Image: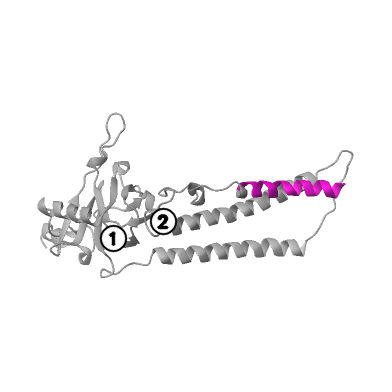
Amino acid sequence: MRSNRRLRWAAIPIAIAFTVILAGCTQAELHGFMPGFIEGEKSVTNHAETTATLWTTSWIVLLGVGVLTWGLIIWAIVVYRRRKGQTGLPAQLRYNMPIEIFYTVVPLILVIGMFAFTARDQNEIETQYSDSEADAVIEVYAKQWSWDFVYDNAVDGKQVWSSGQQAIEAEDGSIDQDALPTLYLPVDSKIKIALNSRDVAHSFWVIDFLYKKDMFPGKTNYMSFETQREGTYAGKCAELCGEYHSMMLFNVKIVSQAEYEAHLADLANAGHVGDYGADYDRNHNMPDDKKSSFQKSEEGE
């Protein structure tokens, strides 16, 4: 009789787990409720699926560990509770070798496994295109508190650029999206982005890309990906960078090749042609070999 009661208690967490699994998953659930996924359509970039899969699989494994742990805790609470009329201490055990091996080996396997899969996916995501492999090479400059976008070899082999201003919040709390700096990218293309900071530490985060990377003065970081779905995607700085950090917003528009080239032509026609890179950085306290010619000229060097 006692054995049947124990089996019923053990079956509860197992039944709950199977109920969740058999309930079926929507597109959002399959990707761990991460942003950027639409039913029946590709992810925004080729890396978003990898990131979401790692996230969801990790949570499934951790949920399994949690269910097992909760089940064992409930089992111990119910089965080995003090009954009415019982006195004294329960039987004491010095050690249980099988259990000790279990709770040593299994966590070790979990940690090694999660590290291995994370390292594999990180290696894939962090593999950068060369300039010749990329369909578009773009330099992004973060600054307090906005963004500059420089498109390399865009029009007649020259750079074209756009310079942004920080977002301004209206009295009702809304933001004029059309006034935000906007990075244009062609769809179904290999993109290489060079990330730089003109002043302090920032972080380039496009939410639906499921990816962000820090930007440091005097150091260039890179990110490479392939665009897969047209649309407008929100971006922001993800590193506290000063008073108006929350207003350091931008948009990314993934468009057709024709619309992308038209945007570059518009920038060229507006006179935004030529080098708009490190010469316009604000820092003047960097080592001499890191200073731009503009900084040196201002210092009279």
Q: Which of 192 and 286 is in front in this view?
A: 192
Q: Residue at x 45, y 49 (%)?
A: 34
Residue 48: which numbered mark, if any?
Answer: 2
Q: Which of 198 and 234 is in front in this view?
A: 234
Q: Indicate whether residue 18 is drawn in magenta.
A: yes
Outermost residue, top side = 171
Q: Give the residue type that dot 2 points to.
A: Ala
The local secondary structure at tag 2 comes to helix
Residue 75 is situated, as x and y percent measured from the top left of the image, at 75, 48
Question: With respect to residue 101, does 22 lie above or below?
Answer: above
The local secondary structure at tag 1 comes to strand
Q: Is residue 162 left or right of residue 98?
A: left
Q: Residue at x 81, y 57 (%)?
A: 93
State the residue position of label 1. Answer: 193
Residue 161: which numbered mark, if any?
Answer: none
Q: Indicate whether residue 39 is drawn in magenta.
A: no
Q: Which of 27 and 273 is in front in this view?
A: 27
Q: Nearer the viewer, residue 289 or 235?
A: 235
Density class for disc 1 (Cα within 10 Å; few <14, some 14-19, many ≥20) is many
Q: How far apart are marks 1 and 2 (CA)?
A: 16 Å
Q: Give the residue type that dot 1 points to.
A: Ile
Residue bounds of the magenta highlight? 1-20
Tag count: 2
Q: Is residue 44 left or right of residue 168?
A: right
